[in-house]
Image (cartoon, helix red, strand yellow):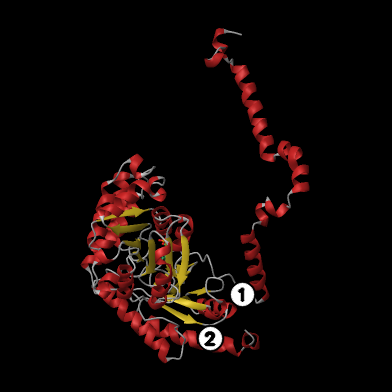
Amino acid sequence: MTDSDKKLFGLSISDKKNLIERMRSRSRSETDKPRFTQKFSKALSRDIPEEYYKIESLPGLKQLQIHAAAAEKFGIENPFFRMHEAVASNTTWIGDKEYINFSSYNYLGLCGHPRISQKAKDAIDRYGTSTSASRPVSGERPVHRELERKLAAVHKTEDCIVFVSGHATNVTTIGCLFGSNDLILHDVLAHNSIIQGAILSGAKRLHFPHNDWAALDKILQENRSKFQRVLIVIEGMYSMDGDIPELVKFIELKYKHKAFLMVDEAHSLGVLGEKGFGIKEHFGVSANDIDIAMGTLSKTLSACGGYITGNHALVDNLKYTAPGFVYSVGMSPPVAAAALAALEILEAEPERPKRLRELGALFYHTAVESGLDTGLCQGYAIIPIIIGSSVLSVKLSNRLLENGINVQPIIYPAVEERGARLRFFLNSTHTEKQIKDTISILIKELNHLKRNPIYKLL
Ligand SMILES: Cc1ncc(COP(=O)(O)O)c(C=O)c1O
C-alpha cells in the first residue's frame, strides 16, 4: 500500500471500493427482501392470516373495490379527483374545456386574486417557501404574527394561533385541551375533524340531533354533573346541508350548564354577517360568549391552514401544548401572506359577501320554486339538491359535466343513502345566468335519467 493509497479512518481506496460494493449489494438484497421473507415467512403464514399483514388487505381498499365494482356495473365514471387546470372559481378548466364550477369553497372568488398572488410571491422572495421546522424551533416570520393579529381583530378576540391544516386545527385543539374526565357534545352532523379531535382527547363523546339545542339541554341536564369539563361543539354553517345553528340558544346553554362552547367557522367566515365576519356577526353576539372559535384559511381566505381565536389564556396554552402546533412545521410564509391579503380584501370589500348572499338566495329560491328538494338549506352559499340515491347522484353529476357544469355528488356513506345529493357551492363571482341555466339543465337531466326504468328501482 502506497502513502497516497492511505485515507481517513485507515481505509485504503481499494478497501473503500470493496466496502461500498458490499453495502450496495446488501441494500439490493434488502430491497428484494429474500433474507427476511425466507427467515420468517413460514412462521408468519402459519400463525397470522394474510389480511393482517398485507397492505392490499386493509379494509379501506376493500370498500373502494366494492364501490368501483358497483360503479362499473352501472356504467358510471368516477366523478372524483377531476384534474383542474386553472383557478377554480365560478368557472374552471378541466382538461381542455371550460366549465361553470360549483365545487370550490372559494366563496368570495379570492383565490387567484392578483393582489393575493402577488403578496404570496413577495413572501417567497423574502422568506422562501418553507419555515423548515416548527415555529417554536425555527422562529417566527413577521407574516405569521401579522396574520394572527388580523384574525384576532376580525373576530374581536385577544389573540389567535394559526395551524398548517384546518383539519389538524380541530384534531389537535380538541385533542389536547380535553381528557378522560370530560364530556364532548357535538352536533350529529359535525365535521370529521371535530370527531377525530374528540376521539383523540379520550373524553366521553356524545352527539345531539342536528341543531337541536333543546335535545342538547336535556343531555346536559342528565350528564353535566358526571364530568369535570364539558365542551359543546357546533359549526357556523353545516357544509352538507347549508344551514346554521341558533347560536344564541347554544350560548345560553353554555352559561346555564357551565360548559365551554366551540364554534367552527370553516364555512361561515366570508358568508354570514354584514361584513362577512361570520356567525357571531350574523347574530350580533359578543366574541366573549364563545370560548374557542375555529376557522380555516382554505375556503374564503384562499390559502391553506386553520386557526383558533380566543383569549390569551387559550392561545398561550395551545402555543406550548398543542402537538399539531409544537411538533409540526410553521405555516409556509407565502400561504400566511396569501391568507393575510385575503383577510384585508374581506375587510375592505363587504360587497363581496353581500353579493354571495344575494346569489345564494337566488339559487335557493329558483330551486325551491322549481320543485327541487333542498333539504335543510337556508339559502346562503351552500345549496344541496337531494336526489335520494347515490347512483343517480353520480350519474346526474356526470350528465351535468357533459353539459359544461362541474358539481360534485355527495353519496353514501358521507350521507345516508336517501340523503344522497348534489352539493352546490356558490361564489360571489357567479352570474345570475350561470345559476338559472344550471338549474334548468339539472331539471332536464334529472327528469331524463328518472325516465330510465333502472333508476325507477333506486
Ligand atoms: C366544518 C369544517 N371544519 C374543518 C374543516 C377542515 O378544514 P381544511 O379543509 O381547511 O383542512 C372543514 C373542511 O372542509 C370543514 O368543513
Of the two numbered discs 2 and 1 on the same chain, state the one appearing first in sequence: 1
Residue 127 in sight in this render: yes
Which circle marks residue 117 in the picture?
Answer: none
Quarter of the figure that contains the C terminus = bottom right
Residue at image location 31% in from the left, 41% down from the top: 139
- Check disc 1 and give the amino acid type: Ile
Q: Are marks 2 and 1 in contact (CB under 8 Å)?
A: no
The reply, left or right, for residue 252 in relation to residue 190 is left
Residue at image location 27% in from the left, 59% down from the top: 151
Which circle marks residue 76 in the picture?
Answer: 1
Q: Position of residue 370 (x, y in %)?
A: 44, 91
- Check disc 2 and give the amino acid type: Leu
Q: Secondary structure at mark 1?
A: loop
Residue at image location 54% in from the left, 89% down from the top: 447
Residue 243 in sight in this render: no
- The residue identified by callout 2 is 446
Tell me the CA gap for discs 2 and 1.
15 Å
Q: Is residue 157 above or below residue 385?
A: above
Q: Residues within 10 Å of mark 1 (few under 14, many from 20)?
A: some
- Quadrant of the image where one finds ligand 1: bottom left
Residue at image location 26% in from the left, 56% down from the top: 311
Q: Position of residue 24 (x, y in %)?
A: 64, 30
Q: Is residue 410 above or below residue 173?
A: below
Q: Position of residue 387 (x, y in %)?
A: 52, 82
Looking at the image, which is closer to me, 121 or 48?
A: 48
Q: Secondary structure at mark 2?
A: helix
Instruction: Using the rendered view, name the quadrant where residue 150 is placed.
Output: bottom left
